[in-house]
Amino acid sequence: MQPVDDLAEGQAVFVRDIDRTHPGVTPAASQNMCEAASVCLARHHEPPKRFSITCLGRFDTFLLQWEPPTPRARNCHANEHDATKDGAYAVILLTVERQLRLVAVGQAETGTGADWFVAPIGRGRDESGAPNLDHPEVLRLEVSGQNTGTIGHRIRVKQQQVARGSPSIAGIAAVVGFERAVIRIEDAVTRGDHEDEPV
Amino acid sequence: MNPYEESQTHIVEANRLLRAEDVQSARFHFRKAADLQWSFVKALPGDRVRTIAVYGLSAATLYYRAHALDEAEGIIHRLLSRESIEEHSQWGLRDLLARIWNEQQMEAMGYHLPAQPVSVTFSRGNILHGLAATDAVDTPIRSVLNLFQRIAAWMGGFPFSAKPHSLLNESYRAFSSEPALGSYRIDLYLAQDAQLVLDLPDVGQLPSPDSVMSSFIQVVSCASEGDYGGLCSLVGDEPYRTVFIRLLRNAVPDGTEVGEVEFRRADEPKEQAVSLYPSHREPLRHMLRQSQPPSARVAPEQVQQYTGVLRAVDLDANLLRLDMDGGKMPFHKAHDILDDIVGPLLNKRVTITGHYPRRTGGRFRASDIELAVDSEAA
C-alpha cells in the first residue's frame, strides 16, 4: 500500500460532502460528521489550517478548510467525547481517501463503538451497493480523535486494537489530534515511538 | 437506497436523538436499523462469511441498543451455530450475549442497568494477574460505591445529610463484576430500580446511573489533577464536595499493596482513564483543608494524630474505637466524619486527626480519619 501524494501546495481539502466519494457514508452521516469536525477544529483554529500527516511512515501536509460552526451545530455537538469521535471520522476518511485512495464502503456497530471498512475506489461493494467485506481488498479502519495533547500514545493503542481485531480482515489505525493539527495513519506494526511531528 | 444505507440513516438519527436524551425515539430508530441490517445479512449468500459475521454482530448490537433483547439473543444464537463464524467474531457475539443475559436478569429483578459500568483497575504493588488481597481492594471499592450514592444524592438535589436519603438506598443497587483476566479489574454498575423512577412524588428526578457515573469520572478527574477550582465549579455545595474528597481519599492506593487505581467508563478508550497514585493523598488533604471554613481550622500546634486499627464505630455515642498499642481507646468524632466514610475503614489501620478543645472539658475530638500509610504513621 503506497501513499499517494496528490495535493498541490496550498490546495485546501474541504470537510464536507464525504458521501459523494465514500459510498459507505450516507448524506445524513456525512453531515453529522462534518458538522462535528467543524466544531472540533474551530475549538483551536481558524480555517484554513495546515495539518501535518504521517501516513505509513511517510510525511505530508495539507490545508484543511471548513465552514465555521453555527451556534446550533455547537449546541448539537456540545458533548466533547462524541464530537471528537464523529469529527475524527470526517477528517480521517478525507485523509485516507487522499493519501491512500481508500474510501469507506461500510460501518458496523461493534458493541463498543463502530468500525469503518475501507477499500480502493470501486471495490468492496456488491451489485446493490451494499458492503462486501469478503472482498480481499477491504480493510478495517480504526479511528480515534484527540482534542488536545500529543497523539503518539493514542496511535499505539489503536495499532494494538487493530492487531487484536479480526485476523481475516487486515486493518489500519488512524488518529487525528485537533489542537496539534496532526494526523497519523499506521498499520498494526509499530514504526517507532516518535511523537507528533512539528507542523 | 439499499438496506445498508437506509440502516445507516436510522443509526445517525438514533444517535442524534440519544444526544437529545430522547431514548424512546432513539430506540425506535435503532430497531429500524437492526431490522434492515438483519434482513441484509439473511439475504447474503452463505459464502460471504466475513460480511455475515460483521453485520450479524452489528444487527445484534443494534437490537440491543433498541432494547429488543430477545431479538438480539436470537440472532446471536443463530450466528454462533454457524460453523463458518471465525473465532474473533464468536468472542464479540458471546460478549454481547453475556451483557444481554445480565440485562434480562436485572430487569426481572426490577432494576435498570447503565449502558456502561465504571471499570476500576488495581495495579502495581502486590497486585497479581486477576488476584488481589481482598483487604487491599475492598476499602477503595466500597468507598467508590458510597461515592456513587453521594453523587446521586447531590445530582438529585437532596439536601446534604449525614446519611444519604433512604430513597437512594431503595432506588440504586451497586453491582460488581468478577475480576477480568490479566489485571485486577472489576466493573462497577449502579443499577436503578425501574419502578421507583416512575413513582417519586416529593423529590426531584433521580439521576440516571449513567449520569451518576459520568459525574463520578468528572469528580475523580478534577481531584486527580489537583484542580480544586474545577471541583468547586463542578460541585458548588461544600458539604458534598468535602465528602466526595474524603471518599476519594479512601481510594488512594497505599503504594505497597496497590500502586495505582485507574477509573474509566468501560466504553471509553484506556487513554481517557483517570488514575490515582499514592502521591495524590497529599493534594487531596490540601483540598480538604481548603474546603474547611476558617472557623473550623485549628492551630497546627494543637493538632494531634493517633494511629491504630479501627475496631468499632458507636453511632449512638458518636465514638470511634481504635485498637492501639496501648489498648483500646475511644475517640469522639466530629459530625462531618460520616458513616459512609468510616464504614469502609472498619478493621483497617487508620490515622485519626483531631485536637483537644478547651471548651469541651479536654476530650479529644476527631475531625478526620483516613487509612494509615505506614511511612506516615504517627
Image: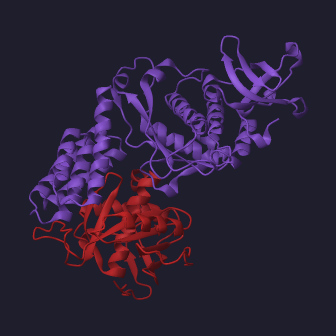
In the rendered image, the vertical position of residue A38 relative to residue B71, given as above or below: below
Identify the colour scheme used. Answer: by chain
In the rendered structure, the colour chosen for chain B is: purple
Q: Residue A26: x, y in percent?
A: 23, 63
- In the picture, the quarter occupied by the C terminus of chain B is top right
- The answer to whether B72 is drawn above or below residue B208 in the figure is below
What residue is shown at x 17% (from left), y 44% (from top)? B74
Tell me which corner region of the image, top left, top right, bottom left or bottom right, holds residue B367: top right
Left or right: where does residue B98 sit relative to residue B232? left
Q: Residue at x 70, y 33 (%)?
A: B370
| Relative depth, front residue between A115 and A161 | A161
**Colour of chain A as rendered:** red
Q: Quadrant of residue A117?
A: bottom left
Residue B336 locus on image (x, y percent): 69, 24
Towards the viewer: B84 or A114: B84
The answer to whether residue B12 shows anywhere in this view is no
Task: Kindly tell me whether residue A144 is visible in this rendering.
Answer: yes
Q: Quadrant of residue B109?
A: top left
Indicate the quadrant containing the N terminus of chain B: top left, top right, bottom left or bottom right. Answer: bottom left
Which residue is rendered at x = 61% and y = 41% of the image?
B233
> Looking at this view, is A180 or B335 the one in front?
B335
Q: Position of residue B323 (x, y in %)?
A: 75, 23
Residue B320 place in picture, x, y as percent = 72, 20
